[in-house]
């Protein structure tokens, strides 16, 4: 009696495990939910998803939402988007939101936007409810040299048709900043900018900065405007300082050349004096040779000595007169 009971218990346990595995592998509960939600999907299709490594709930639940919203989608399209790495639930939510807002958006376009790395649901929401992008403070200089710092708020709406391949928020901010710099730079003075800040937004908006971007610019509003440094005066001061340094360098160069010329002249004078001393040293030899050869008499020698003594006396008298003056 005990043997048959044990066998029956083992069979029951094995059967229970098989049923548990079967129901875990075959999403019967999901199939029943889909059936009563009006979504016709075969049980073998769900089993095939398991073999294709597709989570059936990631496909069936979004399909139920789309069907309830009146959007007809095929299981193959959803499964292909899932296998491509897309977010099926986000795409379906975006399609429902677009349908409710009367925005033309096909599944292929939504899938392409999602695979491009953009939040398709967020894009639809921005298309319905415009978004405000605040730029950082942009520093620009008017013609009078005064710096003006401007902060702008850009109201944009997503352009569904250009979401794939269109430029993002960073490009919009960069273009608006460039437009602000150009507009302020063309103003005659910073006072004109402060008196009429709307001219900045009007000029920038007229440039068509949303071309090639994923957004449509609705308005550009100046949120804050401040006066900064006097760049013109600072540049003039820097230029004057640079000119002063250049002049000092040239003056130092001329002084060095003058010192070098002076030293060269001193060297030449010393050289000439050395030659004079050397020549004077040869005079006694020449006189002795002249006396010896009879070309010069004794009286001629003494006359020359008298002339030299008279010359020395005149020099002495002249120096004494200069000292007394």
Image (cartoon, rainbow, N blue to C red):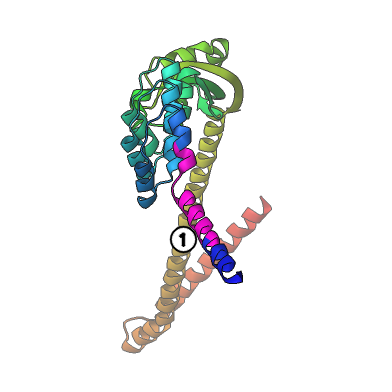
* Vertical relation: 158 (above or below) 303: above
Q: Is residue 161 left or right of residue 205?
A: left
Tell me the quarter of the image containing the N terminus: bottom right
Whether residue 15 can be seen here: yes
For image coordinates 45% across by 66% down, the residue present is: 269
* Vertical relation: 166 (above or below) 97: below
Percent position of residue 146, x then y:
55, 24
Percent position of residue 313, x then y:
57, 65
Residue linked to disc 1: 260
* Vertical relation: 137 (above or below) 281: above
Q: What stretch is highlighted in magenta?
A: 12-31
Q: Is 16 within the magenta?
A: yes
* Vertical relation: 237 (above or below) 309: above
Tell me which secondary structure the magenta stretch mostly adopts: helix
Q: How crowded is mark 1: few (under 14 residues within 10 Å), some or many (20 or more)?
A: few
Residue 159 sits in quarter: top left
Q: In this view, does 113 lie to the left or right of 305?
A: left
| Residue at the far right in the pictured view | 324
């Amino acid at each position: 009696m005990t043997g048959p009971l044990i066998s029956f218990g083992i069979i029951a346990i094995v059967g229970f495990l098989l049923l548990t595995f079967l129901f875990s592998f075959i999403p019967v509960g999901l199939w029943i939910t889909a059936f009563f939600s009006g979504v016709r999907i075969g049980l073998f299709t769900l089993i095939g998803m398991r073999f294709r490594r597709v989570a059936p709930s990631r496909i069936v639940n979004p399909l139920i939402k789309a069907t309830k919203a009146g959007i007809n989608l095929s299981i193959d399209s959803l499964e292909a988007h899932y296998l491509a790495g897309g977010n099926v639930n986000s795409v379906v939510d975006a399609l429902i939101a677009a349908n409710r807002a009367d925005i033309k958006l096909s599944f292929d376009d939504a899938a392409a936007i999602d695979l491009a790395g953009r939040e398709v649901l967020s894009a639809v929401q921005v298309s319905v409810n415009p978004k405000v992008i605040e730029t950082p403070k942009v520093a620009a200089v008017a013609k009078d040299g005064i710096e003006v710092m401007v902060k702008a708020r850009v109201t944009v709406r997503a352009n569904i048709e250009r979401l794939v391949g269109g430029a993002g928020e960073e490009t919009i901010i960069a273009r608006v900043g460039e437009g602000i710099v150009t507009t302020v730079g063309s103003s005659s003075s910073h006072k004109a900018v402060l008196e009429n800040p709307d001219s900045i937004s009007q000029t920038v908006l007229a440039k068509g900065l949303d071309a090639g971007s994923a957004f449509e610019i609705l308005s550009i509003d100046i949120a804050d405007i401040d006066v900064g440094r006097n760049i013109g005066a600072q540049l003039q001061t820097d230029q004057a300082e640079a000119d002063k340094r250049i002049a000092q360098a040239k003056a130092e160069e001329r002084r060095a050349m003058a010192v070098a010329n002076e030293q060269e002249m001193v060297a030449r004078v010393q050289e000439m004096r050395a030659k004079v001393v050397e020549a004077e040293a040869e005079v006694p030899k020449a006189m002795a040779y002249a006396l010896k050869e009879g070309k010069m008499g004794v009286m001629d020698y003494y006359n020359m000595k008298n002339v030299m003594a008279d010359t020395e006396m005149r020099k002495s008298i002249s120096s004494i007169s200069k000292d007394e003056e």
